[in-house]
Amino acid sequence: MIKQQLQLYFIMGSNNVATSDPLEVLEEALHGGVTCFQLREKGPDALVGDEKQRFAEACKALCQQYQVPFIVNDDVDLAIAVDADGVHVGQDDETAKSVRERIGKDKILGVSVHNEEEMRTAIAVGADYVGMGPVYATSSKADAKPVSGTVLIREMTASYPDLPIVGIGGITAANFAPVLTAGAAGVSLISAIASAEDPYGAARQFKDAIQQEVQLS
């Protein structure tokens, strides 16, 4: 089930949307076909405190309408407060082991990994999926790691076929196919949808292209 939910994984914070209401962007993306949503409220002008929680609750409500998992990036307290479907953590955040203990076994746990050692650790603590990248150069994260391409995805899929991998970083409609061909369960996007003039159309284009790619493989 989780593998199908990861096919088109949208990541957004309120500050990733420059000209529109972020909730409108999220609803358009959900309507367009995103299969999972992660709230990543970080960086300049990010919401904090009660305002952040209200925004998270509104995002969760939209996700529920479309029966799409609602994941919170890094902020475990917030995830617990709004009863999110899961938490995603990076290597510099709270440890995945601690997060799993806090959220319990029934919630989704995602972990960002960049090598085989981190992959093995994620498996050991019971991660439900891992995010791997940046596959391509990205401007969405100021602290992004060096570009990794698809080689690591291919290697880790071959070695650990039971743990779904999501490719992240610089993914567009023009370059997503090699990520899936390498074995990823899906692709995660920020600016390709959040910054699109037509978020619905962008999500629908990805959804249709991904389904076509999956049918061909």
Image (tube, rainbow, N blue to C red):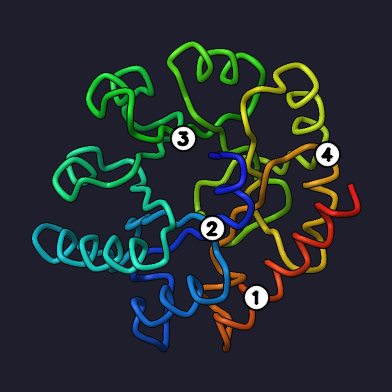
Task: Compute the Cα span from label 2 to label 4.
Answer: 20 Å
Is residue 50 shown left or right of residue 147? left
Task: Compute the Cα span from label 3 to label 1.
Answer: 24 Å
Task: Compute the Cα span from label 4 to label 3.
Answer: 20 Å
Q: Quadrant of residue 108?
A: top left
Query: Picture coordinates of residue 128 (x, y %)?
Result: 49, 29
Label ID, residue 35: 2
Residue matched to label 4: 182
Viewport quadrant of the N terminus: top right
Q: Residue at x 34, y 56 (%)?
A: 42
SS for dot 3: strand
Residue situated furthest left in the rendering: 50
Q: Residue at x 35, y 32 (%)?
A: 93
Residue matched to label 3: 110
SS for dot 4: loop
Comparing labels 4 and 1, the label whose residue is closer to the camera: 1
Q: Residues within 10 Å of mark 1 (few under 14, many from 20)?
A: many
**Mark 2 or mark 4: whose residue is earlier in sequence:** 2
Quick one: 48 or 83, which is closer to the camera?
A: 83
Q: Residues within 10 Å of mark 3 (few under 14, many from 20)?
A: many
Comparing labels 2 and 4, the label whose residue is closer to the camera: 2
Contact check, label 2 and label 3, Cβ < 8 Å: no
The amino acid marked with disc number 3 is: Gly
Contact check, label 2 and label 4, Cβ < 8 Å: no
